[in-house]
Image (spheres, helix red, strand yellow):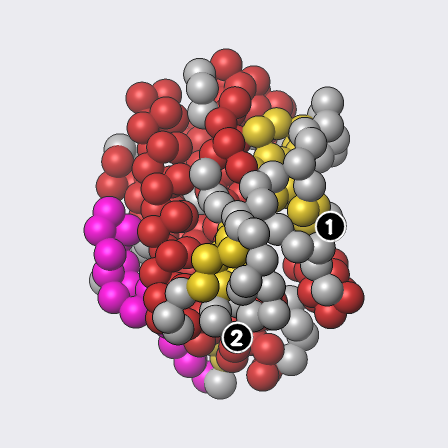
């Protein structure tokens, strides 16, 4: 993939502590394909996450730790795809072998992401559309379909690898995958800090999730309420089980379907 533009670098800094377009995987990073290769990585991550929840909240309900791990892993392919679609109208490879991440030393959250592959899809008007590794697609709708398909393929591998070790069934895991994708698309716009930028993120979510595409569980649920954008979550994060934590806005436990 070509190096990011100055505008992209500035915008991405608002959305991530770090997004690297790189080929190597430093010692303290993990490639997604390695994470999915066996239960050992997820067992270790869940142990760290449970310990962090206990220190922060005085308790660590197993369902909450499981829900956080699911959402935080799916954040990796969702965030990479959403940010590059939003800022550059490009979709990189989202194969597990082509993505890597680093988990923070305090809060055990993926605080840095890496795109390892050189191939990407883009629009015919992209200045890099004729370069090696670039595949031009017809229009924005086709580009959105590429993102949706690539993200869903990665999420399917996660559901297959992690599902047997999770407290949640397949439907709940795919609901979390749907939330991760729409939140990433919306969040890429919100990071711009203006109503116009947030609106562009909402438009991206409507473009990528214009309908329900099984196994994803819903089309975009973003809507205006009291002049603010909100969405109905598909999955529960179980944060309400933590001490003094309320239910999230849009929690599926309380919202009508």
Label 1: which secondary element? loop
For the question of whether residue 62 can be seen, the reply is yes
Residue bounds of the magenta highlight: 206-226
Q: Is 132 left or right of 154, judged from the image as shown? A: right
Label 2: which secondary element? loop
Q: Is residue 255 above or below residue 240?
A: below
Measuring from the top left, give residue 37's x and y in whole percent. 45, 19
Residue for point 67% across, 74% down: 193
Mark 2 — residue? 125
Task: Indicate which disc, 2 or 1, sits on the residue closer to the N terminus.
Answer: 1
Mark 1 — residue? 17
Residue for point 45% across, 51% down: 180
- Residue 143 magenta-drawn? no
- Residue 216 magenta-drawn? yes
Residue for point 43% across, 60% down: 182
Badge 2: few (under 14), some or many (20 or more) residues near its Cα, within 10 Å?
A: few
Q: CA distance from mark 2 to mark 1?
A: 30 Å
């Amino acid at each position: 993939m070509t190096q990011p533009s100055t505008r992209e670098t500035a915008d991405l800094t608002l959305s991530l502590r770090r997004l690297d377009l790189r080929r190597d995987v430093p010692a303290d990073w993990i490639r997604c394909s390695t994470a999915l290769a066996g239960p050992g990585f997820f067992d270790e991550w869940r142990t760290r996450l449970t310990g962090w929840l206990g220190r922060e909240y005085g308790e660590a309900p197993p369902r909450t730790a499981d829900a956080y791990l699911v959402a935080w892993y799916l954040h990796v392919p969702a965030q990479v795809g959403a940010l590059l679609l939003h800022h550059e109208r490009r979709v990189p490879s989202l194969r597990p072998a082509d993505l890597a991440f680093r988990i923070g030393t305090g809060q055990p959250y993926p605080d840095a992401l890496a795109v390892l592959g050189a191939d990407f899809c883009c629009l015919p008007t992209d200045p890099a559309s004729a370069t090696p590794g670039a595949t031009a697609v017809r229009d924005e709708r086709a580009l959105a379909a590429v993102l949706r398909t690539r993200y869903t393929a990665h999420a399917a591998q996660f559901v297959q690898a992690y599902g047997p070790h999770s407290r949640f069934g397949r439907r709940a895991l795919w609901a979390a995958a749907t939330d991760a994708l729409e939140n990433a698309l919306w969040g890429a716009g919100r990071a711009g800090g203006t109503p116009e930028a947030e609106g562009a993120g909402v438009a991206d979510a409507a473009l990528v999730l214009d309908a329900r595409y099984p196994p994803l569980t819903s089309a975009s649920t973003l809507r205006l309420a009291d002049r603010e954008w909100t969405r109905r979550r598909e999955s529960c994060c179980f944060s309400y089980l933590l001490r003094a934590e309320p239910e999230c806005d849009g929690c599926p436990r309380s919202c009508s379907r």
